[in-house]
Amino acid sequence: MHLSLTAVIVDDYDTAIDFFVEALGFELAEDSPSTTNDGRPKRWVVVKPPGAETGILLAQADGTDQEAGVGQQFAGRVGLFLRVDDFDTTFDRMSSYGVEFVGKPRDEPYGKLVVFVDVAGNKWDLLGPSMEE
């Protein structure tokens, strides 16, 4: 058993794809036409970190309730955690893309850490190896 997908509500598919692929280094695993429950067109868009089983379904907001949820999926808390092998290279790539960071990178017992904000406004932890690793 494994967690296959988690959804992130976004304003626009293509802007979100660009952010996840270019800024974070994810792979576009799927981008297929689909339909809503009531038959309107939408897309099934999945991005994943390279080699990962678990992906993120980029769900474009549909209606006022979902639009209100963009960037608020975790009520302002960090809700997603991206662990990388090379923190500094990832941080530099994200910085050059213009990703918004909350504070400066710091060392914690569990690894190097900085909070960043995704294209939708959700907070994530970027985590790298600890000094002991």
Image: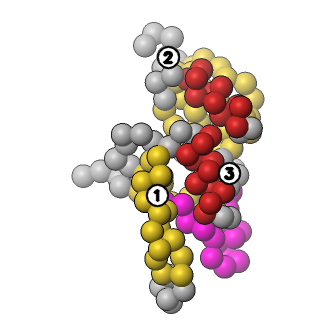
| Mark 3 or 1, nearer chain start | 1
The residue that mark 2 highlights is: 130
Q: Is residue 103 left or right of residue 111?
A: right
Q: Position of residue 91 (x, y in %)?
A: 63, 27
The stretch of residues the image draws in magenta is: 57-71
Question: Between marks 1 and 2, how big is the CA–CA gap?
Answer: 30 Å
Q: Disc 2 marks which amino acid?
A: Ser
Asked if the stretch drawn in magenta spans residue 61, the answer is yes
Q: Disc 3 marks which amino acid?
A: Val
**Closer to the camera, 49 or 132?**
49
Q: Is residue 130 positioned above or below 36 on the image? A: above
Q: Which mark is residue 119?
A: 3
Q: Position of residue 103 (x, y in %)?
A: 75, 29
Question: Between marks 3 and 2, how big is the CA–CA gap?
Answer: 27 Å
Q: Which mark is residue 88?
A: none
The count of marks equals: 3
Classify mark 1: residues with Cα within 10 Å, few (<14), some (14-19) or many (20+): many
Q: Give the residue drawn at x 54%, y 29%.
A: 127
Q: Secondary structure at mark 2?
A: loop
**Closer to the camera, 87 or 98?**
98
Q: Secondary structure at mark 3?
A: loop
Q: Give the residue drawn at x 70%, y 37%.
A: 97
Instruction: Identify the residue at the far top of this view.
Output: 132
The residue that mark 1 highlights is: 46
Question: Between marks 3 and 1, how big is the CA–CA gap?
Answer: 15 Å
- Res 105 seen here: yes
